Image: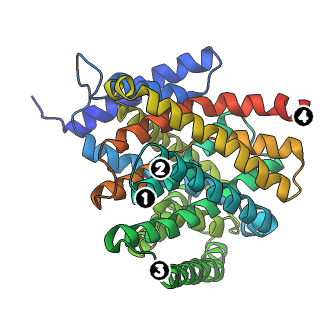
């Protein structure tokens, strides 16, 4: 009998189970993202009596492609002109939200009797919304053509940039037990310089190259070339110790100026959907029901702080930038969750010994809860905003 690699069996189980649950959720009119999360809980290693998945480390690496291709797809629809259009309001809203959420998280940590550095890690983990979850949910609810989504995407990208800076600052604080404003400003300057250079060089090179070959390229070659460009900048971003999602988004924004943009979007959609499904199922696999039961009070408290805090802080940022009550309410309800960046932040804190190892499954559980709530909060935001 021919031996099959465990990874192939795992992918067969994940995609098969995710397909069945997706059909069920479409039939009952519920968001497919929730179905993927539930699929992960069912087939994951923490749900008895059987473990359907055997090669979790490799699957985790493959799941990262889901984040990469989702962010790449956002970039393809979110051109440089849109970034400039929403730049100032998105910047103000992101700063207000992150600042208020860090304060809330820090205060909560202090009330729980945590160390200062641990409280700061908690605050930053609760401050960053999930780009992947929001994009997938808006896509399913067919809201991506609304003007509000451009502002939301701008805020999410700026949040990711802020998260990179906060990661660097927290890492230095955890290592040296001190905070250096000079080093933080230097890191910020480097980030702006490097990201700006990617945009400038990209817009001079890639769209022109795609124009030169537009009459001599097949669908197969265009797919390969687009994916290669995306992964190239992802590798560059990783080399500079920045988020891979940032690199994927920037390359998507650059290629948005290519003449084949509509063909690229159509060709990349199936690839994005497959890897996005794997990503969300893998998040569900991380949820341990035993930990939720044991720490349910802490998880519910932190989830409430995350949801209410983000609704208030994002809504306040919207009002400060004169977005109107309706838009500000819808913006706040949409941003009310945490995700993949929070895992990275807490994971780094565990490695550096700044936070307790038990915080990781708690943050994952909070992410799962807030992800479950996201579609319903978005639906609720319209009536609430209209009534106010």
Q: Which of marks 1 and 3 is nearer the N terminus?
A: 1
> Separation of disc 1 and disc 2 at Cα?
7 Å
Q: Point out the frontmost of discs 1 and 3.
A: 1
- Tell me the crowding category of disc 1: few under 14, some 14 to 19, or many 20 or more residues within 10 angstroms, Cα based: some
Snapshot colouring: rainbow
> Separation of disc 4 and disc 2 at Cα?
34 Å
Residue 215 visible at all? no
The image quadrant of residue 307 is top right
Q: What element carries label 2?
A: helix
Q: Which circle marks residue 110 in the picture?
A: 2
Q: Earlier in the sequence, mark 1 or mark 4?
A: 1
Q: Which circle marks residue 259 in the picture?
A: none
Marks 1 and 2 in Cβ contact (< 8 Å): yes
> Separation of disc 1 and disc 4 at Cα?
38 Å
Residue 161 spot, x, y in % from top left? 57, 66
> Separation of disc 3 and disc 2 at Cα?
22 Å
> Separation of disc 3 and disc 4 at Cα?
44 Å
- Tell me the crowding category of disc 2: few under 14, some 14 to 19, or many 20 or more residues within 10 angstroms, Cα based: some
Residue at x-position 34% and y-position 29%: 291
Q: Is mark 3 on a helix, strand or loop?
A: loop
Report the residue marked by disc 1. 116
Q: Earlier in the sequence, mark 4 or mark 2?
A: 2
Report the residue marked by disc 3. 180
Q: Is mark 1 on a helix, strand or loop?
A: helix
Decide which of 388, 140 is in the foreground and name it.
Answer: 388
Decide which of 158, 300 is in the foreground and name it.
Answer: 300
Count of marks overlaid on the render: 4
Report the residue marked by disc 4. 388
Q: Is residue 83 left or right of residue 356?
A: right
Residue 47 spot, x, y in % from top left? 30, 22
């Amino acid at each position: 009998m021919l031996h099959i690699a465990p990874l192939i069996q795992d992918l067969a189980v994940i995609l098969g189970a995710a397909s069945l649950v997706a059909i069920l959720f479409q039939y009952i009119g519920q968001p497919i993202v929730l179905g993927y999360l539930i699929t992960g809980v069912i087939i994951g290693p923490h749900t008895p009596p059987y473990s359907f998945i055997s090669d979790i480390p490799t699957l985790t690496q493959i799941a990262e492609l889901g984040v990469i291709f989702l962010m790449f797809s956002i970039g393809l629809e979110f051109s440089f002109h849109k970034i400039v259009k929403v730049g100032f309001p998105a910047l103000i809203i992101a700063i207000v939200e992150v600042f208020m959420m860090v304060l809330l998280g820090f205060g909560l940590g202090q009330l729980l009797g945590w160390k200062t550095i641990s409280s700061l890690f908690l605050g930053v983990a609760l401050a960053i919304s999930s780009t992947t979850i929001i994009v997938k949910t808006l896509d399913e609810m067919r809201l991506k053509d609304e003007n509000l989504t451009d502002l939301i995407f701008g805020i999410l990208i700026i949040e990711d940039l802020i998260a990179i800076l906060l990661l660097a600052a927290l890492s230095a604080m955890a290592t040296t037990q001190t905070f250096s404003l000079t080093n933080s400003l230097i890191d910020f300057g480097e980030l702006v310089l490097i990201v700006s250079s990617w945009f400038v060089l990209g817009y001079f090179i890639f769209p022109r190259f795609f124009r030169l070959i537009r009459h001599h390229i097949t669908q197969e070659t265009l797919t390969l070339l687009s994916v290669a460009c995306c992964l190239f900048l992802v590798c560059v971003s990783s080399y500079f110790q920045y988020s891979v999602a940032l690199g994927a988004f920037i390359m998507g924004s650059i290629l948005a100026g290519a003449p084949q943009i509509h063909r690229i979007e159509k060709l990349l959609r199936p690839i994005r959907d497959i890897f996005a499904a794997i990503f969300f199922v893998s998040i569900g696999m991380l949820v341990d029901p035993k930990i939720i039961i044991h720490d349910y009070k802490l998880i519910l408290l932190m989830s409430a702080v995350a949801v209410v805090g983000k609704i208030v802080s994002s809504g306040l940022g919207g009002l400060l930038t004169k977005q109107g009550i309706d838009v500000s309410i819808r913006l706040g309800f949409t941003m009310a969750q945490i995700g993949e960046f929070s895992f990275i932040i807490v994971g780094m804190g565990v490695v550096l010994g700044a936070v307790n190892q038990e915080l990781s499954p708690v943050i994952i559980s909070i992410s799962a809860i807030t992800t479950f709530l996201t579609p319903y909060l978005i639906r609720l935001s319209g009536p609430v905003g209209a009534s106010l």
